[in-house]
Amino acid sequence: MDALNNDDEGTYDVDSAVPFHVMLSDIGFKTAIVPYKNKDFWQSFVEGVNSARSGAVDLSYLQVYDGGAANNPCNWDLGLPLVAGLWSRDVSTEEVQSRMQDWAGACGIEGGFMWLYDEFDNSPGVASYADAINLVFASASPRGKSSPGEIGGAFSSP
C-alpha cells in the first residue's frame, strides 16, 4: 500500500487534515481525494498539502452519485487528474458510457468508477460496466500515483 483515499464526508477540518496528510507524505504515502461536496474545503486541502509536499495529493475520485449526484466534473478542477464515479442503481451501462464520454470531451476526466460494487458483484453487470468505461478510456490511466494503473482508466473484465 502506498496511498490513502481521503473520503471526508463530515469533518472538513483543513487545520487537522493538512498536517495529517503532510505526515503521511513524510512516511511515503500519497493521498487521493474522494469529494462529493464542499469544494472550497477540498481546494484548500489540496493546496495546503501540495504546497507543503509537492504532489502528495495526486488524484481526485469525484462522486457524481447520491449526495454528489448534481456534480459536474467540469466544475471540480482542483489541479488534479479527475476520475468520475456513478452509482449502478442510477445509471445503465449505456448512460455510463455516454456520460463518461461527454465528461472526457468537455473537461478531460481521465477515468471512471462505479459505486456500489456490492450491487452487481458476481453478475454480468461487472463486465458490462467495465466495458462501458473501457470504451471511453481504453488506453488511459490516471496520471496520479495513487492508482496502480487500473484504477480509473481501463479496467479488466472478469
Image (cartoon, rainbow, N blue to C red):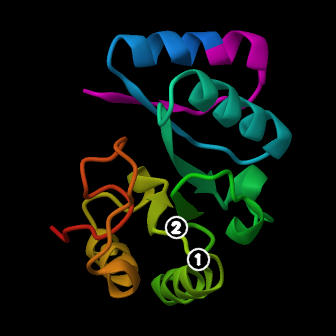
Q: At numbered mark 2, what does the secondary structure look like: helix, strand or loop? A: loop
Residue 7 painted magenta: yes
Instruction: Point out which mark residue 91 bears.
Output: 1
Label 1 is placed on what type of residue?
Val
Q: Which residue is painted at 36% across and 78% down in the image?
A: 137
Q: Which residue is painted at 35% across and 67% down in the image?
A: 153
Please tell me how many numbered marks the rendered image carries.
Answer: 2
Residue 34, image x, y percentages: 59, 43
Q: Quadrant of residue 4?
A: top left
How far is the residue under mark 1 from the one under mark 2? 5 Å
Residue 6, image x, y percentages: 55, 30
Task: Decide: is 70 above or below 13.
Answer: below
Q: Give the residue at the far left of this rendering.
A: 158
Q: Quadrant of residue 70?
A: bottom right
Contact (CB < 8 A) between labels 1 and 2?
yes
Residue 101 painted magenta: no
Residue 27, image x, y percentages: 35, 11
Kindly identify which residue carries mark 2: 88
- The residue closer to the viewer here, 117 or 57, is 57
Instruction: Point out which mark residue 34 bears.
Output: none
Q: Which residues are magenta?
A: 1-18
Residue 44, image x, y percentages: 77, 33
Label 2 is placed on what type of residue?
Ser
- The residue closer to the viewer here, 53 or 112, is 53
Q: Which residue is painted at 57% across and 11% down in the image?
A: 20
